[in-house]
Amino acid sequence: MTEHAGPTPTGILRSRPERWLFKGIYGLVLASALVAALDVPGEEANPGQDALWVLLTALTSGAAHGYAHVIARRASGDGTAGPSRLRAVLAEWPLVVAVLPTVAMLLAATAGWWTEETAADTALVVNTVALFCLGTSAARTAGLGRLASCRAGAMDMLLGLVVIVADALIE
């Protein structure tokens, strides 16, 4: 999957599907890694603080990624006009949207609907399934058949499984 530096001419909120997929996959992996790292067995649970860290990290990552595109375009000296700094940062919105289900699950734990451990485990599973769905969808959009699309989805899902296995081994 390739990524393009600037927002589409049709507007920042209507990103092309491949851009959403790229940033959505990045956001899901980021959310999974953070929720796994923040849910430390034996420590006092603080799902509200963890939700804030996941959201803040996604916002910061999106801003850094967008701004890096601006700097890279400037440094390349290719003479093309790139997006403004703000537009480049705002174009990262799919990354932030991708972490919102994880944030919501952690906030549900804050509300006492379930434990932080359950919220973290559920987020890892939901994000891994979402990775499969995004990978499969991207492959179908690219014109691959069902079996090839499922293989592509499985490869994306492996990213989530790596986080789950690492979390289990580290704990």
Image (cartoon, grey):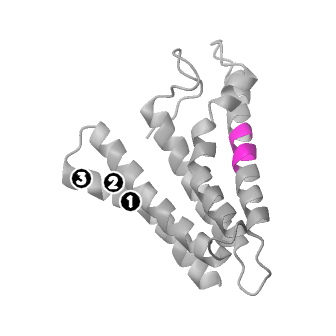
**Is residue 125 visible to the viewer in this orientation of the structure?**
yes
Residue drawn where x is 71% and y is 57% of the image = 54
Horizontal side of 30 relative to 49 (left or right) equals left
Contact check, label 1 and label 2, Cβ < 8 Å: yes
Disc 2 residue crowd, few under 14, some 14–19, many 20+, Cα 10 Å? many
Residue drawn where x is 51% and y is 50% of the image = 25
**Is residue 156 visible to the viewer in this orientation of the structure?**
no
Q: Is residue 86 above or below residue 29?
A: above
Location of mark 2 (residue): 152
Helix, strand or loop at disc 3? Answer: helix
Q: Which mark is residue 148?
A: 3
Q: Is residue 37 above or below residue 147?
A: below
Choose the circle earlier in sequence order: 3 or 1.
3
Q: Amino acid at mark 1?
A: Met
Residue drawn where x is 80% and y is 81% of the image = 44
Disc 3 residue crowd, few under 14, some 14–19, many 20+, Cα 10 Å? some
Residue drawn where x is 65% and y is 12% of the image = 79
Q: CA distance from mark 1 to mark 2?
A: 5 Å
Helix, strand or loop at disc 2? Answer: helix
Residue 59 placement (x, y as % from top left): 72, 44
Q: Would you say residue 61 sits in the magenta stretch?
A: yes
Dominant SS of magenta comes to: helix
Q: Which mark is residue 104?
A: none
- How many numbered tags mark residues here? 3
Contact check, label 2 and label 3, Cβ < 8 Å: yes
The magenta span reads 58-63
Q: Amino acid at mark 2?
A: Ala
Residue 19 placement (x, y as % from top left): 50, 35
Helix, strand or loop at disc 1? Answer: helix
Location of mark 1 (residue): 155
Q: Quadrant of the N terminus?
A: top left
